[in-house]
Amino acid sequence: MPQSPPVASRAADAAFEYCAKLTTSHYENFPVASLFLPEEKRDYIRAVYAFSRIADDFADEGDRTPGERLALLDDWGRRLDDAYAGSADHPVFIALAETVRKNRIPREYLADLLSAFRQDVSVKRYGTLDELLDYCSRSANPVGRIVLHIFGHRDEELGRMSDCICTALQLTNFWQDLGYDISRDRLYLPAAEMHRFGYSEEDWRKRVVDERFRGLMASMVGMTRDLFAAGSALPDKVERDILLELRLVWLGGMSILRRIERAGYDVFSMRPSISTPGKIMLLARGLLMRDISRYGRKRERKKPWDLT
């Protein structure tokens, strides 16, 4: 008679299934644990996603007061400590404990994510680009480092390239959502950069798209593209199991930037996104291109709003 799996094993399987359902129930800009990844690795990435998704909702969703949000995030932090100590009792943390144990993931990466979520509760404006990049270093970069750990990569050079891509993806999402964020009273365009182009917060609230705004956005999109370029060698330096996934994420981010440009930087009239045919084209590029950094190198014909 076959033996039943140990209770701990059954609990871990159920926890990973819980995380998988949570992952598929949320829309994200870029693929999360797609079918291009090995099943075991997908489980680990889903566990990290579930941890982050719930914490992000604590910080942003619902009608909670700031104090209530911070209390929930503090409790999430205590649960994280318990998971690292081997005493998890929540499905997300049971799966996460297994993930960090098997992949030797440093606690600081997950703690950095929580610090960014706490910042979301109270900080809705950024004075300088450095302040915004510091936020990205905690809200986005740890995810890339964790994924590299899951695939056995701990080289610091790869980590730095991953940081560039993750920050670029985060910034791309900010530029996409400039219109949507008006209703949330959250502005990620740094005040110093807005001042440099003579564009005000009141202009943003009124969804003004003029030469000032286009100049500002051209600067932000250009900086974001430079970050993508700085990380473009990463997909070809990792193992084959994750190569295609990283290419698709990189190409997806670059494609959104191109759509922002082609819309004349008007992200208020319609949120730039990738259609199903566009995703198929990106998959083809990801499969066929040997050097993804070639994508988007050629400058398009100069637009009337270009200031250079």
Image (cartoon, helix red, strand yellow):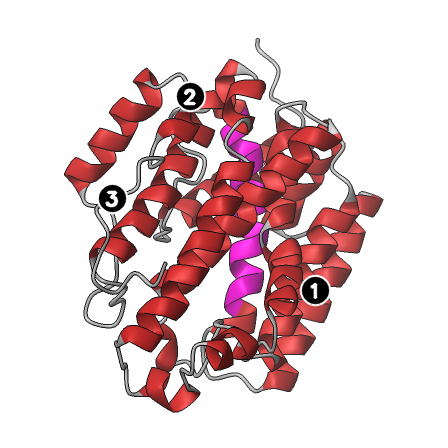
- Residue for badge 1: 115
The residue lying toward the viewer, choosing from 11 and 65, is 65
Q: Is residue 87 visible?
A: no
How many discs appear? Answer: 3
Most common secondary structure along the magenta stretch: helix
Q: Position of residue 289 (x, y in %)?
A: 34, 19
**Picture residue at 73% right of the left edge, 27% below the top:** 155
Q: Position of residue 265 (x, y in %)?
A: 28, 64
Vertical arrangement, residue 125 with respect to residue 307, above or below: below
Q: Quadrant of the C terminus?
A: bottom left
| Mark 3 / mark 1, whichever is N-terminal | 1
Image-quadrant location for residue 99: top right
Residue bounds of the magenta highlight? 41-57
Q: Is residue 135 visible?
A: yes
Q: Position of residue 220 (x, y in %)?
A: 45, 61
Residue furthest top as drawn:
1
- Residue for badge 2: 291
Confirm whether the magenta stretch covers residue 104: no
**Picture residue at 38% right of the left edge, 65% below the top:** 217
Estimate how packed mark 2 is, as few (under 14), some (14 to 19) or many (20 or more) residues with alpha carbons within 10 Å. Answer: some
Using the image, tell me which numbered label, if any, was put on residue 300.
3
User: Along the horizontal axis of the image, is 89 left or right of 263?
Assistant: right
3D distance between C-alphas at marks 1 and 2: 35 Å
**At label 2, which amino acid type do we have?**
Asp
Q: Considering the numbered disc 3 on the image, is that residue within a helix, a strand or a loop? A: loop
3D distance between C-alphas at marks 3 and 1: 40 Å
**At label 1, which amino acid type do we have?**
Ser
Vertical arrangement, residue 298 with respect to residue 91, above or below: above
Residue furthest bottom as drawn:
202
Estimate how packed mark 1 is, as few (under 14), some (14 to 19) or many (20 or more) residues with alpha carbons within 10 Å. Answer: some
